Amino acid sequence: MKRLISLSALAVAFGCGAAHAQYTDGTIKIGVMNDMSGTYADLSGQGSVVAARMAVEDFGAARKGMKVEIVGADHQNKPDVGSNVVRTWLDVDKVDVIVDVPTSSVALAVSEIVRDKNKVFLVSGAGASDLTGPQCTANTIHWTYDTWALANGTGSAIVKTGGDTWFFLTANYAFGMALERDTAAVVTKNGGKVLGQVRHPFPGTDFSSFLLQAQASKAKIIGLANAGSDTINSVKQAAEFGITRGGQNLAALLAFITDVHALGLQTAQGLIMTEAWYWDLNDANREFTKRFAPQYKGIHPTMVHAGVYSAVTHYLKAVEALKSDADGKAIVAKMKEMPTDDPLFGKGTVRADGRKIHPMYLFEVKKPSESKGAWDYYKLRATIPESEAFRPLAEGGCPLVRS
Amino acid sequence: MFEVFGVSSQVLFGQLLIGLINGSFYALLSLGLAVIFGMLNIINFTHGAQYMLGAFVAIFLLQYAGLGYWWALLIAPLVVGATGIIIERLFLRWLYQLDHLYGLLLTFGLALITEGVFRNYFGSSGLPYSVPPSLQGGQNLGFMFLPNYRAWVIVFSLTICLATWFVIERTKLGSYLRAATENPTLVRAFGINVPRMITLTYGFGVALAALAGVMAAPIYNVSPQMGANLIIVVFAVVVIGGMGSILGAIVTGFGLGLIEGLTKVFFPEASNTVIFVVMAVVLLIRPAGLFGRST
């Protein structure tokens, strides 16, 4: 049941005099691959296609005589499905750049294929910090967030306010493991202690059993190293089993605004989370959201969508500067050399290991009484400056850095 | 307090109770499947989607009509059951003469369409629905905190299961149903409207799925794919219990809930595969399932 849905093929422009630029078969082809039908479909899904399309429009590709086409596909959160799609895209359909790819196990597989075929991979949806660590490549840029940044933001904030004993509820795949590992390191570094962990199958439905084990551990903080509907179910059921009333607190290590929307503020209030982007943070973000939401069933953009927009913008700039989309390594090198600048993430840089650098934000979910209505969910607790937001270059173990 | 393999009895009892709660969902869902398969010989793959519909109807009732959980428990099964009756009249009745595969493919297609439509309109993250005020809070049992709502789920689901079993196996109506499955022509000769009985049976099976959906809404994430995640497990339950066996569906539903609960303590990584391991073993030893009659 392989579903490869060619979602939207959008020819933005037919450059008449594009002879001076060497684009493979005359077109820059962007492949947005993510979860279009499962647990991560709202936080990435079609919305990432919308974001990529907006980036191409705002870049003015048509005006500049660049012919850009966007295709989308569903990887169903399965590495084998994702690898097949990407191989077909790169070999047959002449796709030049793969964008988004939530679900770290899929992203890690795709990263290798893209390196072998010398194309470009811009990660927005996936979290595993290994993508810029031991498994970094010269063809991959990790754009929006990673497990280290989440652990660093949420983990250290909680340990510093007294949450010094932890028990992890971890999704049993690359992302969950990486998030647990990175958070445990932050907890220990700040003088806290990890009392245990339980690894649940992904995706799961009933978490009460795991929550009871967490409860029995007597840890002050139950760290949810999972995402999407797994996080939603964990938070919902923790409230039901009176875990928070018993004095233990939840740390949703990765939660998106779409998850908070699905939980409702009544259940989600007080959760602390780290994000790279929030729609109501400034005028530029609100402006973007006003254009984005009507194209995506009213769903407000997540940081993953914003990251896709920002990454595609920077990619197009590099391709424009090089006047070629043929050599993936050269494009990524150019992207690292040029400073980034776009309306959503402002000015930033791409580091040698492929890590995009920008500030991260620590948010707290509002109480129902504080919210003005749907999607008004976060209050800003702290801004983590870009110098502290991501793992120091030397600590990642990326082979590109050593050489 | 004693310990089993390093796990205190306190934790163990808690996990067993939780296994029983999950088992009551398995039992309720597999019961509907078993009733439909037993009477119609249709493998109803739409069951997961109908379970999801039940939960969504509960949310719509709250949002648009202001009707809470208790009304939903009554209305949602009726509404979704009615859609089931329409499906049976429009599509399924043409398939009874054909191979099982046709019914399976048709219902599978309907499930994909239903889930796709809901995903298109409501997204995949789902919608919030809370526990009814009268069932909020819980009891401290000493070894665990049991939310009142979960206790209600066990009791209610057990009641429904046993009532269904009683009606089908012990009453006159049930005997008509069973006779109609064995030999429809003969039963029709006695002046009983067999097609209508079959239609209503399908409606009832679907209503059971919707009922489970309403019961799940306050504790699980209500999203278009909530049924798809569960339905495969439920099918395994039905196969283990013996296709079409009512008692088999109920007993295996609760039993596998317990086994899964224990796995979550001793080897959590395997908790979603353990049911299929059991299924493989059972099929090797008893190909017709634990309670099935080999034909």
Image (cartoon, rainbow, N blue to C red):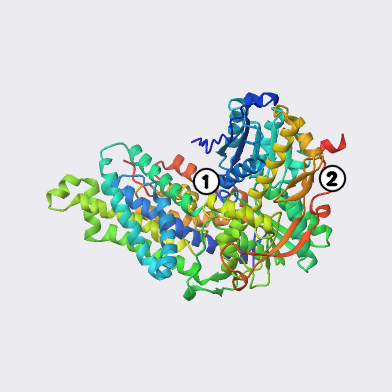
Which amino acid type corresponds to the residue marked 1 in the rendered image? Ser
Up/down of A169 relative to B295, above or below: below
Q: Position of residue A234 (x, y in %)?
A: 60, 60
Kindly tell me whether residue A227 is visible in this rendering: no
**Which residue is nearer to you in this view: A343 or A385?**
A343
Q: Is residue A170 left or right of residue B26?
A: right
Marker disc for residue A37: 1
Q: Is residue A31 left or right of residue B194?
A: right
**Which residue is nearer to you in this view: B48 or B162?**
B48
Quarter residue A300 falls in: bottom right
**Which residue is nearer to you in this view: B49 or A208?**
B49
Q: Secondary structure at mark 2?
A: helix
Q: Secondary structure at mark 1?
A: loop
Kindly tell me whether residue B175 is visible in this rendering: yes
Q: Is residue B145 left or right of residue A217?
A: left
Q: Residue at x 63, y 52 (%)?
A: A288
Up/down of A389 relative to A9, above or below: below
Marker disc for residue B93: none
**Which residue is nearer to you in this view: A117 or B85?**
A117
Q: Position of residue A215 (x, y in %)?
A: 65, 66
Which amino acid type corresponds to the residue marked 2 in the rendered image? Leu
Query: Which chain contains the residue that carries disc 1?
Result: A
Up/down of B219 relative to B177, above or below: below
Residue at label 2? A393
Q: Residues within 10 Å of mark 1 (few under 14, many from 20)?
A: many
Q: Residues within 10 Å of mark 2 (few under 14, many from 20)?
A: some
Up/down of A119 relative to A107, above or below: above
How many marks are shown on the rendered structure?
2
Query: Which chain contains the residue that carries disc 2?
Result: A
Q: Residue at x 34, y 60 (%)?
A: B79
The residues tagged by marks 1 and 2 sit, at their Cα atoms, a distance apart of 36 Å
Q: Position of residue B255 (x, y in %)?
A: 47, 56
